[in-house]
Image: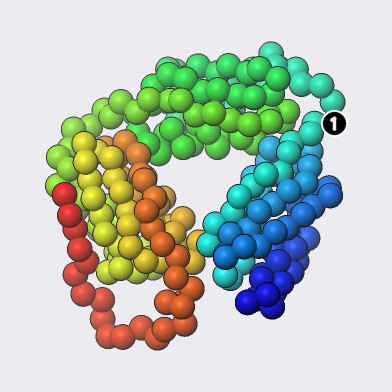
Amino acid sequence: MERIKNDIRQAVLDQLAADERVKVENLEVIVNDGTVTLRGTAPSYRSKWAAAEAARRVWGVYSVNNQIEVRLAAPTDDERIATDIRDALMRDADLDSRHINVDVDGGRVTLRGTVPSGWAKSRAEDDARWTRGVVSVTNELVVVPTTSATDRHLAVQVEQALRRDAAVNADRIDIVVDDAHVTLSGIVRNWAERNAALEDALHVPGVVDVRDSLSISYAEAARPARGLPGRGRRRL
């Protein structure tokens, strides 16, 4: 067991060292039962985020506890950061940001207002996250769908989206929809499949948000595929 922990720790260190986006000083990686804890200091929120994203790619990692602290090289200019974020939101041709308010305090960003979909809420946070000087992002946007769809219809649309994705085995994923809130549960083979499934569901029109109850089983990745995929399960 100790050898496996050491192997995962070294693999995470190697993965972070090979990622140009990750610039963390005094990096500490702790592995416990598949949970990786990252500690250290990063010069930007983007670098902190990238470190966790890189760690999740390592085989054997089930979750990441990102305790990296963001320490900016210069004092924050909250007004400039807020302006840059508003500009980034406006430049995003796929996002209607007219009803999004941006507040910044010490580099800590809070997004408030309304957006038409869960995907738009996630996209707005992405735009804010990559802005220079940001320390953290709190997303308090409220989703007000512009389309009306029954939960049963949304469940069918989510299932079809999962089945179209070659990176996802939809047969092992359960879908529950309650008042346009989607919950995915079941087994996935790795973080890449998990992220793909969550994004597929989030992009379905009418979905307010997607809740992650998926479990990673790396043993599943080693099993050869058997036959053609059958019908998946769908619950309302």
Q: Circle 1: is it few (<14), some (14-19), or many (20+) Cα within 10 Å?
A: few
On screen, residue 54 above or below 75: below
Q: Is residue 161 left or right of residue 166?
A: left
* Quarter of the picture holding the N terminus: bottom right
On screen, residue 201 above or below 10: above
Q: Is residue 38 left or right of residue 62?
A: right
User: Quick check: can you spot residue 91?
Assistant: no
Name the amino acid, label 1: Ala
Residue 234, picture quadrant: bottom left
On screen, residue 66 above or below 214: above
The secondary structure type at the circle numbered 1 is loop
Q: Which residue is mark 1?
A: 73
Q: Is residue 48 left or right of residue 169?
A: right
Which residue shows up at 51% across the image and 23% down it?
A: 111
Which residue shows up at 37% across the image and 66% down it?
A: 187
Q: How many marks?
A: 1
Q: Nearer the viewer, residue 119 or 1?
A: 1
User: Quick check: can you spot residue 220?
Assistant: yes
Q: Nearer the viewer, residue 57 or 37?
A: 37
On screen, residue 27 above or below 116: below
Q: Measured from the top left, where is residue 107 in percent x and y?
A: 69, 23
Q: Measured from the top left, where is residue 100 in percent x and y?
A: 47, 20
Q: Is residue 10 left or right of residue 214?
A: right
Q: Nearer the viewer, residue 205 or 32?
A: 32
Q: Measured from the top left, where is residue 174 in percent x and y?
A: 26, 59
Which residue shows up at 32% across the image and 57% down it?
A: 185
Residue 142, picture quadrant: top left
Most extreme residue toward the top is: 79
Which residue shows up at 40% across the image and 39% down it?
A: 119
